[in-house]
């Protein structure tokens, strides 16, 4: 088949005998032989297993585990970095057009810290097979591709040497290397099993994952320190922090540029995590202003309160945005920052944010489809898209980080 345009999710779209085929490991314009991997009533999924006519953007994947039937972690190792960013930009633009009726040229910008697209991921989750060997899930599969190294993992993650050892009794482990120089290994045991931790190649705290975001230190404090701008942030265990070493500071700069917080203003930081954006907002509004952060994870709330303790104008509470804005009687704001998970905000939260009558809303999104869906709802309520920037915070994968500015009409 001849491969058509890129689609959201690391696929390209082709047609075979009138049916839509979503093809991995291909590039637009290529002619390929594809192996059908899944069939539904509406479309097929396939892997390009032989390239008959290659795109000029094609390169040999640097990782031996990137390819049909192998590791499912990377989507675009067979394309140049420039081509990857063009493809991601096309996806963002297509989602904006299709779901929100927005016509906009999109450029996906490089994030400092991964010039060749490798060695950037500071938090890596490995799956363990029944004998304790580590690897990654194959695409749309529970099967595990055992690996001896991950090329997109940060060098300080690889320094631990986790893949060199067996982890019997584990269902998976996460290796973390913070910008503050800390390392941690979070171990998830199989049900009713204990895990013997090997002697690793580099010092690291060892934590036990108890589920639902709870971790217990078994060796070391389990507290990691991250740096963004001139501030240090503590992150307990496997709590959320941007995995690209340059992403946190890049996104903070753009959020503050779009939000334009002024002294004395009242700002909201929704899904605030450990307080990255709340800290920047609080410094800008000063003690005569106020920042109210909402976060649903208890550990993140504790971290955020510790990270913001020198900023009395900042307050962080635990709760789901869907109910907590009402519970805390939040009726207005000058500026709102929202950084939801991949599922996006949803209509209920969009409408509640619009009721605050903020003059500026800054929306940070890791999924262009849910971003575009929500932007359509914001526009209906008088908050059209004013500015948008997109960032390659996940090189070699299909993921892209966007920051959107909505200005009240």
Image: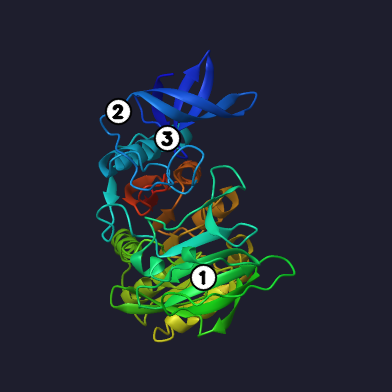
Left or right: residue 263 versus residue 15 is left
Residue at x 38% of width, y 77% of height: 289
Residue at x 50% of width, y 85% of height: 220
Q: Residue furthest top?
A: 17
Work out whether 352 lies above or below 263. above
Q: Which residue is mark 1?
A: 239
Label 3 Cα crowd, 10 Å radius (few <14 / some 14-19 / many 20+): many
Work out whether 209 lies above or below 259. below
Q: Say whether marks 3 and 1 touch (CB < 8 Å).
A: no
Q: How far apart, in angstroms, are the residues tagged by discs 1 and 2?
A: 40 Å
Q: Which residue is mark 2?
A: 55
Report the mark closest to the observer, 1 or 2.
2
Q: How far apart, in angstroms, are the residues tagged by discs 2 and 3?
A: 12 Å
Label 1 Cα crowd, 10 Å radius (few <14 / some 14-19 / many 20+): some
Q: Which of 295 and 284 lies nearest the eye of the viewer? A: 295
Q: Which of 226 and 310 lies nearest the eye of the viewer? A: 226
Q: Which residue is mark 3?
A: 25
Residue at x 49% of width, y 43% of height: 70
């Amino acid at each position: 088949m001849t491969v058509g345009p890129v689609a959201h999710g690391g696929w390209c779209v082709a047609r075979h005998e009138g049916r839509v085929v979503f093809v991995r490991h291909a590039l637009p314009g290529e002619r390929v032989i594809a192996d059908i991997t899944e069939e539904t009533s509406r479309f097929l999924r396939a892997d390009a297993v032989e390239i008959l006519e290659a795109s000029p953007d094609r390169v040999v994947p640097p990782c031996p585990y990137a390819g049909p039937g192998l590791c499912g972690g990377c989507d675009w190792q067979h394309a140049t970095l420039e081509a990857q960013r063009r493809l991601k930009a096309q996806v963002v633009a297509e989602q904006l057009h299709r779901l929100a009726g927005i016509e906009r040229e999109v450029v996906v910008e490089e994030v400092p810290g991964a010039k060749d697209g490798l060695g950037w991921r500071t938090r890596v989750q490995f799956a363990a097979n029944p004998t304790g060997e580590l690897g990654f899930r194959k695409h749309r599969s529970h099967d595990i591709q055992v690996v001896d190294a991950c090329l997109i993992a940060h060098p300080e993650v690889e320094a631990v040497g986790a893949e060199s050892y067996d982890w019997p009794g584990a269902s998976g482990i996460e290796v973390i290397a913070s910008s503050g120089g800390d390392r941690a290994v979070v171990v998830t045991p199989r049900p009713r099993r204990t895990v013997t931790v090997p002697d690793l190649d580099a010092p690291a705290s060892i934590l036990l994952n108890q589920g639902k975001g709870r971790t217990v230190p078994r060796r070391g404090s389990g507290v990691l320190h991250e740096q963004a701008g001139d501030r240090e942030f503590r992150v307990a265990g496997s709590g959320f922090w941007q995995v690209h070493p340059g992403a946190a500071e890049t996104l903070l700069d753009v959020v503050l540029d779009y939000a334009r917080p002024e002294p004395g203003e009242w700002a909201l930081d929704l899904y605030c995590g450990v307080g990255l954006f709340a800290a920047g907002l609080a410094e800008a509004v000063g003690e005569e202003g106020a920042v109210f952060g909402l976060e649903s994870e208890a550990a993140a709330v504790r971290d955020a309160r510790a990270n913001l303790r020198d900023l009395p104008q900042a307050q962080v509470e635990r709760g789901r945005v869907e109910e907590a804005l009402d519970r805390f009687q939040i009726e207005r704001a000058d500026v709102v920052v929202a950084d939801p998970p991949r599922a996006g905000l949803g209509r209920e939260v969009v409408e509640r944010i619009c009721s605050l009558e903020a003059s500026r809303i800054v929306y940070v999104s890791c999924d262009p489809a849910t971003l575009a869906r929500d932007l359509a709802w914001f526009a209906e309520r008088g908050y059209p898209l004013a500015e948008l920037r997109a960032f390659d915070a996940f090189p070699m994968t299909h993921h892209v980080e966007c920051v959107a500015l909505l200005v009240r009409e």
